[in-house]
Image (spheres, helix red, strand yellow):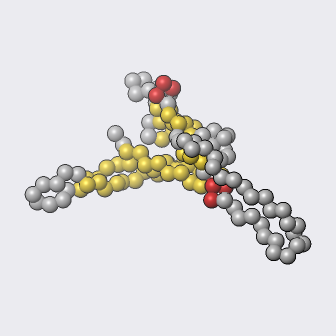
Amino acid sequence: MTAANKRLWIGTGNGVILSIPFNQSSQTPQCNINDSQFSFHGHRDAVKFFLSVPCEAIQKSSTDKTGKKYEKTETMLLLSGGHGYIDFRIGDTTTTKVETKKMDEPNFSFAPISKNDRSHLIVWQINEH
């Protein structure tokens, strides 16, 4: 769990990431559960950590006759770390092959680790408003 960019970010034990905005009209931070969001991208296991990193992004804005015009905007990168990756819109599409050979047999090899089973970082870029 972390607080970043006027939101409370919660990582669940099953890899779901929730984002709940703070109520703007109150003097003390209170969560506004009615406007909460969850991410379509998550981890296959528990969310292990969150990390927020402030940064600047350079965006192209309107151009005029003198040339291109660029504008710096304050942004925040929010990273979540955990075991595996899953897109909750399509579900878990990976299948695991089970190796049936014994270790003392010739040509035995361990099954490769699927890309979705490795540790993953998910990164969001959040523009300051």
Left/right placement of residue 38 relative to residue 27 reads: right
* Relative vertical location of residue 84 with respect to residue 102 in this rendering, above or below: above
Let me know if residue 49 appears in the view: no
* Relative vertical location of residue 7 with respect to residue 45 in this rendering, above or below: above
* Relative vertical location of residue 32 with respect to residue 58 in this rendering, above or below: above
Q: How many marks?
A: 0
Location of residue 44 in the rendering, given as x and y in whole percent from the top left corner: 65, 47
Q: Please state, as top left, top right, bottom left or bottom right, where the N terminus lies in the image.
A: top right
Q: Please state, as top left, top right, bottom left or bottom right, where the C terminus lies in the image.
A: top left
Task: Name which residue lies at 87% across and 69% down.
Answer: 103
Location of residue 123 in the rendering, given as x and y in whole percent from the top left corner: 50, 51
Task: Name which residue lies at 67% across and 55% down.
Answer: 117
Location of residue 49 in the rendering, given as x and y in whole percent from the top left corner: 60, 48
Looking at this view, is 41 or 110 the one in front? 110
Let me know if residue 46 appears in the view: yes
Task: Name which residue lies at 42% across and 23% down.
Answer: 26
Location of residue 107 in the rendering, given as x and y in whole percent from the top left corner: 81, 75
Left/right placement of residue 114 relative to residue 50 reads: right
Left/right placement of residue 72 relative to residue 125 reads: left
Left/right placement of residue 104 relative to residue 114 reads: right
Most extreme residue toward the left, as rendered?
65
Quadrant of the image occupied by residue 42:
top right
Task: Name which residue lies at 48% across and 24% down.
Answer: 34
Quadrant of the image occupied by residue 96:
bottom right
Most extreme residue toward the bottom, as rendered?
106
Looking at this view, is 108 or 75 the one in front? 108
* Relative vertical location of residue 10 with respect to residue 53 in this rendering, above or below: above
